[in-house]
Image (spheres, grey):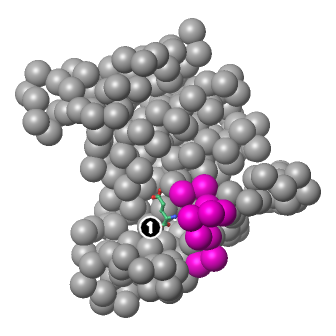
Amino acid sequence: MRIVVKVGTSTLAYATGCLNIRHAELLVKTLSDLKNAGHEIILVSSGAIGMGVGRLSLKEKPQDMPTKQAAASVGQCELMYTYDRLFGEYNHTVGQILLTGADFSHADRKQNFENTLERLLELGVIPVVNENDTIATDEISVGDNDTLAAMAACSAKADLLVLLSDIDGLYTKDPHKNQDAQLIPLVTEITPEIMQLADGEGSGLGTGGMITKISAARIAMDFGMDMVIANGARPRGLYDIVEGKSVGTRFRKG
Ligand code: GLU
């Protein structure tokens, strides 16, 4: 199986901007094992800005564009250093791909991305994709990594897209506020009701929230690909997800 796994900042870093070593190690270990089992893995990783905040000892996430982009520049190095080191422990090689929205709207640039991705996978590399936050401004950026992951998964003609977040999946109500909130295990159609859940109550705390995850699901389902939202604090759930078992919320065209 060709699997695209997207991991959010809230899974990778603490609120301080420092690396969540436990989550990062467990994620890399699981992905390495899935690769050893014969799967092709593409990792879409957020965290550049968040880790830059930590590395530069900034008090909070910057609001102005130059500082945000400077933080991403520093944090992206930290991210790749971390992945290179952790995947290296299992003898796997990573390659960095940084994209903006414009790379998907120009046919030749998109084609170059797809060619490189394919070649990296043939060479046994685990591509690590992120938005090129050091140059992406609002006009040209994809804007969030849930959508970026869905676009990359379509480009890669992947079999499965998994979004690892700080929430177990899509709920009937906000689980942080409602004890009777129920996890929705399977969504076969993005109905207005599902949109409404994402819009208000069901949202998680991650960067993109649930809205961007549902729009990623729409892209994946239109392509004919399954997408799963699961909790990044338990990356071992990926084994069951790959086997098609019920973990988190699966979006599968009915
Ligand atoms: N590209 C951003 C980063 O690496 C994250 C965007 C997102 O989380 O959706 O910091």
Residue at position x 42%, y 80% in the image = 64
- 31 sits left or right of 17 in the view: right
Question: Which of the 4 quarters of the picture holds residue 115?
Answer: bottom right
- 234 sits left or right of 29 in the view: left
Front one among 92 and 56? 56
- 91 sits left or right of 28 in the view: right
Q: Is residue 252 above or below residue 72?
A: above
Image coordinates for residue 139, horizontal then vertical, percent: 62, 63
Question: Which of the 4 quarters of the picture holds residue 222?
Answer: top right
Crowding at mark 1 (Cα within 10 Å: few <14, some 14-19, many 20+): many
Confirm whether residue 83 shows in the render: yes
Residue type of the residue flagged with mark 1 = Gly
Can you say which quadrant of the picture contains the C terminus? Answer: top right
Q: Looking at the image, which residue sits at the far front?
A: 139
Question: Which of the 4 quarters of the picture holds residue 71?
Answer: bottom left
- Based on the picture, tell me whether residue 181 belongs to the magenta stretch: no
Residue at position x 55%, y 38% in the image = 216
Please state the extent of the stretch shown in magenta in the rendering: 134-143
Q: Main secondary structure of the magenta part?
A: loop
Q: Is residue 61 above or below residue 6?
A: below
Q: Secondary structure at mark 1?
A: loop
Residue at position x 10%, y 29% in the image = 178
Can you say which quadrant of the picture contains the N terminus? Answer: top right
Front one among 239 and 36? 239
- Based on the picture, tell me whether residue 139 belongs to the magenta stretch: yes
Q: Does ligand 1 reach within 8 Å of label 1's beta carbon?
A: yes
Q: Is residue 145 above or below residue 240?
A: below
On the image, numbered disc 1 is attached to which residue? 47
Image coordinates for residue 33, horizontal then vertical, percent: 55, 48
